[in-house]
Image: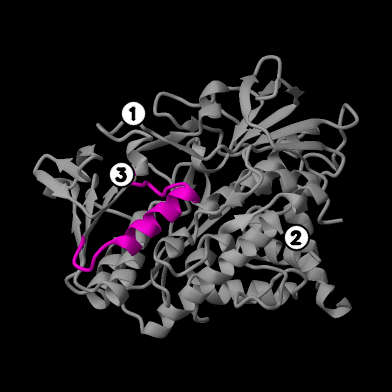
Amino acid sequence: MGQRLRISRRDFVRAGAAVAAATTFPLPAFAQSSPRVVVIGGGFGGASCARSLKQIEPKLQVMLVEQSKTFIACPFSNNVIAGLRAIEKQQFGYDKVATAGVTVATQAATAVDATKRTVGLADGTSLAYDRLVLSPGVDLRFDALQGYDEAAAQKMPHAWKAGEQTLLLQRQLEAMDDGGLVVIAAPANPYRCPPGPYERASLIAYYLKTRKPRSKLLILDAKDAFSKQRLFQNAWKELYPGMVEWVSLSQGGKVNAVDAATNTLITDFGNHTAQVANVIPPQRAGRIAEIAGAADKTGWCAIDPVTFESKGAPNVHVIGDACIAGGMPKSAFSANAQAKACAQAVVTLLSGGSPASPKLINTCYSLAAPDYGISVAGVYAPKNGLLADVEGAGGVSPLDVPRDFRAREAEYAQSWFATITAEVFG
Amino acid sequence: MLAASEPPPGSASCSGCHSTAATSSIPPLHGRDAGEIARAMAGFRDGSLPATVMNRIAKGFTDEESRAIAAWLAAQK
């Protein structure tokens, strides 16, 4: 251990110089004894931010407000849909978050007064804060697609929030006869997990190929290009020839309306009646962001790229899927990276300093089959008021590589999930 | 001492993939030799070290930034 912890003098001096340049205060010195930070939303962003805050500055009073006792993770939930994974492996509790010194309130946050700096909970409790962090994820818009409301989602699942919806789609696929048509309706940008619909198509195709090989899968898309597109399309050709068809926006792929009674998806070019229909509707920031005054006309939250502070609500920070993070996609990895950077900025602000410009990484794995992984990565830094891609970095997995490369990325995907969930909930 | 100060930009993202558990197929970084981490980043950046994703990530950091991150990671338990 002693050996491993030793740093060469040169490295130490260089690091010390970098730290000194980035820091405008010696150590946190708060005006009041223990500032209060409330974090709303217990996912990859919120739970991570709450823990980071406490880790960076143990003197803070940190409260995490989350209405669910159990978090159900979206990454790898497509494996559950395809019958490759138990939903229990997606479930995480908040015991360790509490052990780390975070006060966990199992409550819905229903009000925010950004002027008085208070959060109202469903049971009538009012929480005072010095800084508020919102990590509410997305709300599905049940007002955006004609015929698609919460009742329709019981027939045509979105499965875009993991849990009952995931299991409903899995059961529908299991009950479908061989030779059936599965349709996925993919939304326009921006939405949670850009490669998600295509990973889902891949893993459903894997299920169909192994269990119901005469079936077909159609993706009706509201856009003309998608994340990791060539990698997915190559994988479909290679792994599921003739089974997966993608209809782009310009080919008439945009679903304008659905009829849940007949499982029909309606586009400008015609109707598609599916045996199993997975409708992924447009989304916006979770409702509490709008209540707090942090969401703009787009439904998402504009932020300062250094501090993640809302441009609409002072002392309110927004991270994860709900924020407009420029080049950063709405992913669990992004939310986790933003959470840690935001926690640092909040601690610095509370101690009267000015936060250093951060750098953030995103890495997103998708599975085209259980042993076939592909990835997209990016490095981001504040530029012109947004988190912009650092030029020359990032990009997707190479197109022409042997299968063992894909197998290694599939293994890394598993490792990533184990690591990030351990960091946030373990 | 380093851990109590503001960590260098980018360093907080690493633990999204690199755990402290030796059982992971992704190598742990915390407490690892700083020179080793910095040399690996340089190798990923110039392509002399093969990689799946680290080549794409390393190109987003200068040598100086990589060294600062490496020193910070080395000092973590």
Earlier residue among tags 1 and 3: 1
Q: Nearer the viewer, mark 1 or mark 2?
A: 1
For the C terminus of chain A, which image quadrant?
bottom right
Residue linked to disc 3? A187
Do the CB atoms of the residues marked 1 and 3 lie less than 8 Å apart?
no
First to last magenta residue range = A155-180
Closer-to-camera residue (A190/A253): A253
Is label 2 in a helix, a strand or a loop?
helix
Q: Nearer the viewer, mark 1 or mark 3?
A: 1
Q: Residue furthest left?
A: A269
Amino acid type, label 1: Asp
Protein chain holding label 1: A
Mark found first going from the N terminus, 3 or 2: 2
- Give residue A143's mark: 1
Q: Chain of mark 3?
A: A
Question: How far separated are the C-alphas under marks 3 and 2?
Answer: 45 Å
Q: CA distance from mark 1 to mark 2?
A: 52 Å
